[in-house]
Amino acid sequence: MITIVPYDASWPEAFVAVARPLHAVLGELALRIDHIGSTSVPGLAAKDIIDVQVTVEDFTCTPQLVTVLGSLGYTQVPEYTRDHLPPLYQGPDTDWEKRYFQPPANQRPTHLHIRALGRPNQRYPILFRDYLRAHPMASAAYAQIKINLSQRHPDDVDFYYDIKDPLCDIVIDAAEDWARATSWQMALSPE
């Protein structure tokens, strides 16, 4: 079921609580750990799920990730191996490869995405987040569409993402223009 709730000012703290043990067990394996997704944008309504992106050098470390994250109770979801491919993308499909882990049962709802450094799908959620933080009108419109979708079809997760994914591609297109106009760069270290 898709449920969108008003922004909760405790979400940044919830991210820190999730990220702290990840930093501890991943060490240098994690090049960065970022708060992504709607809960990372102040004022944005969202599902009450903390999205975390761990950036790794490449996916040769997957067996090590499974072991290390397993020590915290995370489990890999092997069927989630890639992100939505934006229309007209010209590069290889492997640019959208990822690993995805479910949190331990006693942890707050969390989506843990592992993406490789320098790939478009590693940059996409960070640029998306920063663009929405800088553009309250776009953020509010994005929230309104998500709310409307969740209210009209709360039990149809596929329908929700069939609309939301192309919407995100529209937002990222504007974000790319903004990034060029402002010389936006991904921060050297996460927030």
Image (cartoon, grey):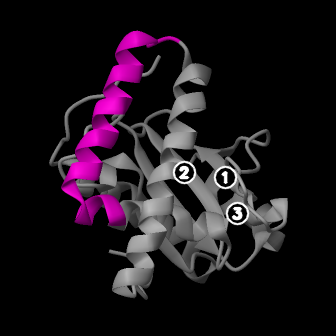
Q: Nearer the viewer, mark 3 or mark 1?
A: 1
Q: Evaluate if marks 1 and 2 touch, with contact meaning CB atoms under 8 Å apart.
A: yes
Secondary structure found at label 2: helix
- Identify the residue at image location x=42%, y=58%: 36
**Which labelled disc corresponds to residue 65?**
3
Q: CA distance from mark 1 to mark 2?
A: 6 Å
Locate residue 180 relative to residue 132 in the image: left or right.
right
Whether 179 is drawn above or below 151: the answer is: below
| Residue 103 in view in this figure | no
Magenta-highlighted residues: 131-155
Whether 60 is drawn above or below 66: the answer is: below
- Identify the residue at image location x=20%, y=40%: 7
* Amino acid found under the numbered disc labelled 3: Leu
- Identify the residue at image location x=33%, y=35%: 48
Q: Which residue is mark 1?
A: 86
**Which labelled disc corresponds to residue 169?**
2
* Amino acid found under the numbered disc labelled 1: Pro
Secondary structure found at label 3: helix
* Quadrant in the picture for residue 108: top left
What secondary structure characterizes most of the magenta part?
Answer: helix
**Residue 162 appears at what percent x and percent y?**
60, 29
Q: Residues within 10 Å of mark 2 (few under 14, many from 20)?
A: some
| Residue 188 in view in this figure | yes
Whether 14 is drawn above or below 177: the answer is: above
| Residue 147 is inside the magenta segment | yes
**Residue 86 appears at what percent x and percent y?**
66, 52
- Identify the residue at image location x=72%, y=41%: 77
Secondary structure found at label 1: loop
Q: Residues within 10 Å of mark 3 (few under 14, many from 20)?
A: many
